[in-house]
Amino acid sequence: MNVRGIKRLAAWPALATVTMALVLGWPIMAGAAEEKNEPPPVKMNTTADHSKFKELQQTFKSGPEVTKACLSCHTEAAKQVHRTKHWTWEFLNPENNQRLGKKNVLNNFCISISQNYPFCTSCHVGYGWKDKDFDFTSEVNVDCLACHDTTGNYKKAAGKAGHPLYEPLETPPGSGKFTQPPDLSKIAQKVGKTSRDTCGSCHFFGGGGDGVKHGDMDSSLAAPDKELDVHMDASGLDFTCGTCHKTSSHDVPGSRYTPTAIDKGGAQMRGKAEDAKRNPATCNSCHGNAPHKKQDRLNGHATKLACQTCHVPAMARGGVPTKMSWDWSTAGQRDKDGKPITKKDDKNHIIYESRKGDFVLGEKVKPEYRWFNGKVTYTLLGDKVEKGATPVGINMIGGSPNDGKSLIWPMKVMRGKQPFDPVNKTLVMPHTAGNDDIGYWKNLNWEPAIADGMKNVGAPFSGKVDFLSTEMYWPITHMVAPKDKAVACAECHSAKSRLAGLPGIYMPSYSARSWLDLIGWLLAAATLAGVIIHGALRVFLGRKG
Amino acid sequence: MSAHAMQKLYVFKIFERIWHWSQAGLIIFLLITGFEVHGSYANFGFEKAVNYHTIAAWSLVGLWVFAIFWHFTTGEWKQYIPTLAKVDAMAKYYLFGIFVNAPHPFRLTTLKKHNPLQRLAYLGVMLFIGPLIWFTGWFYIFFDKWHAWGWDKYLSLEWVAFFHTIAAFMMLLFLIAHVYLTTTGHTPLAHIKAMITGWEEVEAEETAPVKH
Ligand code: HEM
């Protein structure tokens, strides 16, 4: 139990009763345990009880102090983390040499991290990345607890560059309500494997809120039922993220920069050298290439369709909506008193905010479908963009029906309008977050916010601001439904096909050519009319004759 | 009605009759399910329509295997040897004579049980529409294996389906015309009755010509 919880308990009048019961009950329970020689009530998935380690039996005043203690035994852990995207937020795509990673890319949610470091880096596996001069070689600044907390009480605070609270914080300011800092000693003594909660504390909240970004990842996956995800089903298979994203040396496999769109390798085998290089998080890596035992026809389908296309029938199915579009161009409105506005829908979800503009939210959204070969190209900061009829691709996906490397994938297509520089014809990185007199969210003034953000990354800015439409592709892979809830045949094999408009496929019941039908049915009708007339003549003339 | 004396002739053997009616049923069922698969309407639902169509298709194939065997062992295949003799007369009969009770230009015997137009039509069905449906249907059935067998390099489902559908339309046209023409016997149900009982009533001229 955390400090906060204990304090709350202390205020509870029933405490006396509880204490009595404990005091009276204790000798009996202890006796029983002795008799049966019961094992201690700890999870037996580890051989080390961290609460018994002297190194952790101390009061930690900060995150880095905890890390120092971790590193005194796990001497190489920080160096391993240093090599990962989770630490560098940088990724050099070997296929096209684009320098990607959160540090470099733009998106059409909160746009970019330039000048917003202390806010964005509350999801960095480190402490203190508050500006572009962060020391990436620091070992004590690796945040072990972000991923290894098992208590659920470790929280990296907003705007603190990855640190948790160390002092009580009045939230909201002036409310008299205080958020207490987490008890780092308790947390450190209970460290363990990663969980849906630890991964989820960042990945469920990408884009600045629950479910905003991915569509197939939100807090409903912390303890999902089978309906929502057959693998993570908390009362069933209970997979953690790490069950599929099988990690070694702290480097978590699975990537949206270089996704595995098609996995022809079949089920992976432990110890097999070539399997070690493959992505362990694909469906095929466990299920193999012909998983449909009874209906071989479906294995046939799987030579064109990603598993997810049928097995993830809709995204955002857990009750948490995802953002489908974000229009920054309408941001900045104020009410008649000059105050920022917030509008909510009937489920109390924000759909307009002066700081951010208009949102379209979606629940149980059918994905869009695209041929996808795993190649992703980003529009980066210096790249020329043109305001026109077609939206600018924040990322552009490769794929075609006949390159032999593509499958049809479900996608969340995030659409929006975002600021750009109409003179230099580039996207821009505004300074949004922060309690200063430049950040857009506080001041609602684009020019200085963008000028500051661009200056920080050394990019030119003309001073002019306009908005253009963008779109961004998010392959859908989580929220795998039970097989009886998979997309049914007729959802594609029908006039209103889910795959409508995709090139390179013939789908009975959807694709037939209309001219053939026209001729066919006309001829049938003519034949029918012919025989009817013939018959009528026979009856008529026959009677007369 | 004809005033000629009528005589009964056993033209359709039991196998032939069973073959005919099960084939008729299967083809109608294949049309119903096939055009649902095609997307022309919703009836069973796509998935069921595909499954039913596949089952019916295999049944029809099986039936045809028996029928071919039967035709060759019994020599009945000769019934379909095409002849152009009297085709024009048949056409003229259907276009004019039939309306004025003109005599049927063809006299049926057990050795010649189809009139020349029938012969041509059935031969067309058996040598063209049938094989077209078979071959495209088989390619269609094994679509899932194309990839494994390397056939997908040479075949396109779009074209297979296209020709299968064309053949299906031709089968539909044939069916309409065929059903209608069964009513052109000496009574509207005469031919149908014959296909059920095996006995066709024919004018007696064949064996004992009557003078006009
Ligand atoms: C009188 C006979 C038949 C008729 C009228 C018929 C009609 C049709 C039609 C209209 C379609 C839809 C085509 C499309 O839009 O793609 C179809 C599909 C199909 N037919 Fe037939 N067909 C017949 C016999 C057969 C036979 C003999 C076979 C197999 C040997 C066969 C196998 C198939 C298959 C596999 C499909 C596709 C079902 C799927 O989507 O998997 N058919 N048929």
Image (tube, coloured by chain):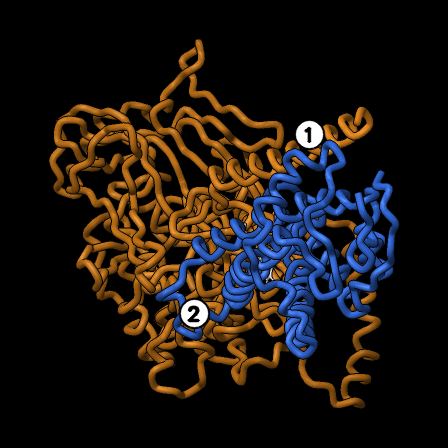
Chain colours: A orange, B blue
The answer to whether residue A81 is left or right of residue B74 is left
Q: Nearer the viewer, residue B114 or A483?
A: B114
Residue located at (47% from left, 26% from top): A352
Q: Which residue lies furthest to the front in this view?
A: B211
Question: Where in the figure is residue A277, as x and y percent of width and height?
Answer: 33, 77
Indicate the quadrant containing the N terminus of chain A: top left, top right, bottom left or bottom right.
bottom right
Q: Residue furthest top?
A: A336
Question: Where in the figure is residue A316, as x and y percent of width and height?
Answer: 55, 46
Specify the amino acid type for callout 1: Ile
Which quarter is ligand 1 in?
bottom right
Q: In this view, does A347 lie above or below A268?
A: above
Q: Count numbered badges in the picture.
A: 2
**Residue indicated by mark 2:** B147
Chain holding disc 2? B
Q: Nearer the viewer, residue A465 or A506?
A: A506
**Residue indicated by mark 1:** A533
Chain holding disc 1? A
- Mark 1–mark 2 Cα distance, whole angstroms, equals 50 Å
Indicate the quadrant containing the C terminus of chain A: top left, top right, bottom left or bottom right.
top right
Q: Which of A202 and A502 is in front in this view?
A: A502
Question: Where in the figure is residue A40, as x and y percent of width and height?
Answer: 67, 82
Q: In this view, does B93 lie above or below A374?
A: above
Mark 2 neighbour density, 10 Å: few (under 14) some (14–19) many (20 or more):
few
Eye-nearest disc, 1 or 2: 1
